[in-house]
Amino acid sequence: KILVVGSSNTDLIAKMKKFPKAGETIEGLSYMQAMGGKGANQAIAAHRLGGDVNFITCLGDDANGQNTLKYYNEEGIDVSSAIIVEGVSSGTAMIFVDEQGENCIVITPGANNSLSPDYISIMEEKIAETEIVVLQMEIPYDTVKTVCALAKKHKKTVILNDAPARKLDEEILKTVDVLVVNEMEAETISGEKIESVGKEFVLEKLVSMGATSILLTLGKEGSLLKKGKISISMDAFKVEALDTTAAGDTFCGALAARLSKGEEWHEALRFASAASAICVTRMGAQPSIPTEEEVFAFLSE
Ligand code: ADP
């Protein structure tokens, strides 16, 4: 079982030739609306890629919140512990994607900021029932810290994706079993620039700061796992990238799903790389997250 504690957003996605400048109005090429938010994306990814997922998230008492609940129920994710907060809007993300597949995003967290440690009893009950706890940084810092501590108390595996990038204190780093970071996130936590000191140095620094295992994702260059003396380097699959939104989320969800199935690291990483490679060939966040069958088909091509 996997417990994801994190954000939900409704994504409003516009595709355009070039991003507008300040004060400029441009005509977009296409528009679509989809469910997103790093927490929700990772919950969906873990579910589609073979995991049994429970998702704790905070929603507003608005239409977006109701649609979100209905959608996750229909997808087959357990959202029975989702929290509805009165008088607050559900989270939204306005996403611009240009012709190169680059993105530019404005997030209004709304109810995601209401997921506070006050809901500790709901969380502890669910943590006790799960094996793997998955977290990101789109909910209050103290909540992430509380969940990490509770997960450790119950001897569960914690996967933390430090996205959006935030500096993490030693207490959090020590309670996390797998810290998943892209280059920018690794630089934010370590306070070092990869370009000047190199990847190895940054990874060592994160270990010296308390991290036990670090999974560094490197976009189309693949990923690198450092776990004690073990180091695994995984190339990315060669694909034509259309939109990289949710690549990291697909990667984290895939990893949780495969580890929950008892797969070894190498196998889990290869699967996660394939899943996120498929993701970048498609538009949007959740619509681009593949299923387990699609990943197996891709891997056997
Ligand atoms: P984030 O989306 O969090 O910035 P990355 O860009 O590092 O994370 O992407 C996460 C993973 O997705 C990478 O480790 C890689 O396996 C896969 N990926 C990302 N971009 C590409 C790409 N252009 N081609 C193939 N795989 C990719």
Image (tube, rainbow, N blue to C red):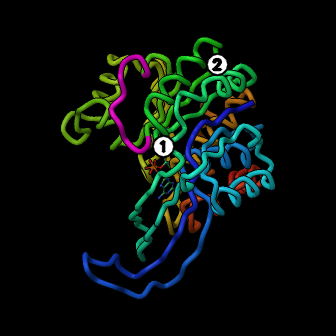
Q: Nearest to the eye among marks 1 and 2: give it.
A: 1
Image x and y of residue 219, in percent: 43, 51
Instruction: Please provide the residue range marked out in magenta.
Output: 163-172
Mark 1 burial class by Cα count in 10 Å: few <14, some 14-19, many 20+? some
Mark 2 burial class by Cα count in 10 Å: few <14, some 14-19, many 20+? many
Q: Quadrant of the N terminus?
A: top right
**Magenta region includes residue 117:** no
Q: Which residue is mark 2?
A: 156
Amino acid type shown at disc 1? Asn
Query: From what the image shows, is residue 257 above or below residue 15?
Result: above
Question: Total of numbered circles in the picture?
Answer: 2
Q: Quadrant of the C terminus?
A: bottom right
| Element type where label 1 sits in the image | helix
Q: Is the magenta region chiefly helix, strand or loop?
A: loop
Q: Which residue is mark 1?
A: 113
Q: Residue furthest front?
A: 87
**Magenta region includes residue 171:** yes
Image x and y of residue 116, in percent: 52, 33
Q: Residue at x 60, y 44 (%)?
A: 58
The circle drawn on residue 1 is none
Amino acid type shown at disc 2? Lys
Image x and y of residue 199, in percent: 31, 34
Q: Residue at x 60, y 45 (%)?
A: 85
Q: Residue at x 35, y 42 (%)?
A: 183
Q: Nearer the viewer, residue 204 or 300?
A: 204
Is residue 271 visible in the rendered image? The answer is: no
| Element type where label 2 sits in the image | loop
Q: Quarter of the image holding residue 287?
A: bottom right
Determine the CA span between mark 1 and mark 2: 25 Å
Q: Residue at x 26, y 38 (%)?
A: 194
Is residue 294 visible in the rendered image? The answer is: yes
Q: Nearer the viewer, residue 68 or 201?
A: 68
